[in-house]
Image (cartoon, rainbow, N blue to C red):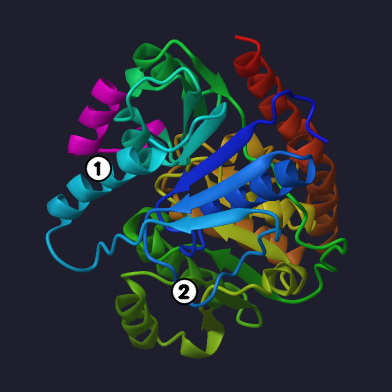
Amino acid sequence: MNQFNPPLDLVFLVADLHYGGGGERVTINLANYFEKKGYIVEIISIAQAKPTNIFSVNDGIKIKYLNIDFNVGSNLIKKIISVLTVKTHFRKYKTKTIVLGIGNYPSLLLSFLPKEKNITTIGCQHLAYSGVKNIWALLRKILFRRLDYIVSLTNSDLPKFKKINKNSIVIPNSIVPVSDKKALLTNKRILFIGRMVPDKGYDILLKIIKKVIEIHSDWEFRIIGDGPLKNHILKEIGLSGLMGKISLLSTTKFIAEEYLNASIYLMTSRKEGLPMVLLEAQTCGLPIVSFNCDTGPSEIVSDNETGFLIDCFDIEKMVQKICLLCSDFELRSRLGKNATHHVKKFIPEVINSKWEELFQQIINK
């Protein structure tokens, strides 16, 4: 049972529980863990409920939907409504409650809450600091100082958050292995998972695929994702003449099979926070080839030990390293084995203890 007395309410505020991204995955992993520990756990989704959820939530966790549909009407008006709705919702909380805003927008909403002795607000960031731009970056600079704590995913971003709010700390994402098995690394398949948005570098990915296939025509690429660029990407794949070498799947709950049936994991992102897909790939023993964007990959991938970090955006170097792995099973095996050991520093027992230390600090105030 929970070591705290009185019982601690733990609330997660997310933009859309059904979005299926890394932030939602982290939320449910944390919520499930602390519910099992005896915490009273609630997840609040700002968006509307949807028929299916690709993640499994413990039965003891309460889920609340604020039912704000951002696809209908003025986006600005919806944002104002969401501020008022969140403020109204939290007025009913009278017991000691810790509220975690998962991502920049939910964190901003928490900053509007009036200061209450029983409510502690924590803004949990899931993008690189540089990944938030324009008005959102300005609002973050102004409003995040009103949060009780900010949690940064990476050490490289911590000094930037501390300039806004001195109560900023680093707690990386934890990773629950998607399988207790390891990839055999014998299938001639390269895996890429990512939402179909510009930041994931799909335009660069297709150039890389074309060059790799020219050298290793017996290999194939598996892309898993959905998003606003999907139709454009499908069109580009068709025009590239690579339709037979690229299989494209929507986000799936059977993701473990995809990792286990691959032999290399590839990331071409322009921006990341601390990408869960890299951690998941390592738990399955996959060597990784990734651009070394500002934050994230370098805190997961050890160059030449668990994979290769490539200067952004050196396509030729990335193609070279992918081809090296394609032609060398022993190298894939060595890097993959190293990855399974390296990723252990992100297991829940290690990371969740950091959360418990923070919660204990809050309770003892």
Q: Is residue 190 left or right of residue 268?
A: right
Q: Residue at x 66, y 82 (%)?
A: 218
Residue to which mark 2 is pinned = 210
Q: Residue at x 46, y 45 (%)?
A: 13
**Quadrant occupied by the C terminus:** top right
Q: Amino acid at mark 1?
A: Leu
What segment carries the magenta color? 129-143
The residues tagged by marks 2 and 1 sit, at their Cα atoms, a distance apart of 49 Å
The answer to whether 101 is drawn above or below residue 60 in the figure is above
Q: Is residue 31 left or right of residue 177?
A: left
The answer to whether 48 is drawn above or below residue 349 in the figure is below
Q: Earlier in the sequence, mark 2 or mark 1?
A: 1
Marker disc for residue 84: 1
Image x and y of residue 9, in percent: 61, 35
Q: Amino acid at mark 2?
A: Lys
Q: Is 130 part of what is drawn in magenta? A: yes
Image x and y of residue 139, in percent: 23, 30
Q: Residue at x 58, y 73 (%)?
A: 215
Marker disc for residue 326: none
SS class, disc 1 = helix
Image x and y of residue 95, in percent: 56, 29
SS class, disc 2 = helix
Quadrant of the image occupied by residue 105? top left
Give the number of marks: 2
Q: Residue at x 48, y 65 (%)?
A: 18
Can residue 105 be seen here? The reply is no
